[in-house]
Image: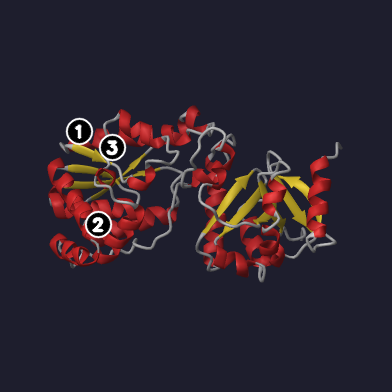
Amino acid sequence: MASDFTAEQVIAVLQEGDRDLAARFTLLLEVLRGCGSVCIGYSGGVDSVLLAQAALLACGPGRVLAVTGLSASVSDAQRELARDCARRMGLPHLEVGTEELSDPSYAANPADRCYFCKRELWSRLAEVAAARGLSWVLDGSNADDVGDYRPGMRAAQERAIRAPLLEAGLTKADIRIISRLFGLPTWDQPSAPCLASRLPYGLAVTPERLRQVEEAESALRRLGLRDLRVRHHGDAARLELGPRDLATAGDRPEAIAAGVRAAGFRRILLDVEGYRRGALNESLTQLEPRRRDL
Amino acid sequence: MISDPRLEEVRALVRAGGFPHADVESGGHDGSIAVIRNVPATAASALARLAPAIRTLGFRYVAVDITPPES
């Protein structure tokens, strides 16, 4: 799927509909050209895929390396998606193991858990970049992330990791529009945060719990459900489904419950309000005024 | 067992909301979920409108129990 469109063609289309967006995308390309050579933190999600596409155009394939951190907190499905997307884009891609689960500060699952995960990730990517002579390590954060509670961004700041999408002022909506113009398969992909985001703060992150969440969510996707989260509450799974799936889940609770029970949960609970981003951060509202995307 | 006075209030709310046979218990590793039992899974959407009131009683989440009977 190497894109059939050049940056200039996409900018021309954008200028017809939204000149400000065209200017932001142009700025993104300028920022990337200024970087020279880049090592991108690449999850296969909508943000990092567009960042990689733009970097390929701005820097050239020989100056771009996308790196995916792998651990039990990354689902097999997400890993495959990242691999497939990189292959189709002609994107140089590397996978490195990360050890955040061995860090007691991360495994205890505090509210700033993401800081410890990102600290590990950026440390590994900085090593890769140094070994390969790449000038900058890049993060896929965008302009919408600034006001949210995102302790992971602190780790990026400590390592001088750059976020070109954010620097260019591109929002998530912008990124989806541009991704669609490039024909990227991620343009309408739901957000896919790591599996640890399904565990309430304070409930220890273990490989076994992450496996349970992954298996339960896979079972629900095999039933055709799309926008969902399985929240781990010890022996109970609390299912958050998107509005469309929640409306029809009542017609087949046995199939839904069976798939989740097979993952090792004793109780299966259907959240009446359904999937809402940042649901586990609802306990943090006294700490932070804004909620984070999870 | 020590009874949780919040559960009585949630039970009254849910029953008054059109589910006269509903029962309620706390669930989750930290008791943060108001678990509504003896209602069909199709009731979830209707119960959503009661969730804000239930949260004011100290629960963080409201869910319908769809656990199948042990085979």
Indicate the position of residue A152 as horizontal and vertical percent values. Answer: 40, 36
Task: Give me the C-alpha separation between circle 2 and circle 1.
Answer: 34 Å
Q: Amino acid at mark 1?
A: Ala
Q: Amino acid at mark 3?
A: Leu
> Badge 3, how many Cα within 10 Å: few under 14, some, many 20+?
many
SS at mark 1 in the image: helix
Find disc 2 in the rendering and name its residue. A21
For this view, does A293 lie left or right of residue A28? Answer: right
Find disc 1 in the rendering and name its residue. A130
Q: Which one is earlier in the sequence, the residue at label 2 or at label 1?
A: 2
Colour setup of the view? secondary structure
Judge whether residue A167 can be spotted in this image. Answer: yes
Find disc 3 in the rendering and name its residue. A125
Q: Which one is earlier in the sequence, the residue at label 2 or at label 3?
A: 2
Instruction: For the C terminus of chain B, give its image quadrant.
Output: bottom right
Select label 2 or label 1 by which is in front: 2
Q: Is residue A167 above or below residue A258?
A: above
Task: Give me the C-alpha separation between circle 3 and circle 1.
Answer: 8 Å
Indicate the position of residue B42 as horizontal and vertical percent values. Answer: 70, 67
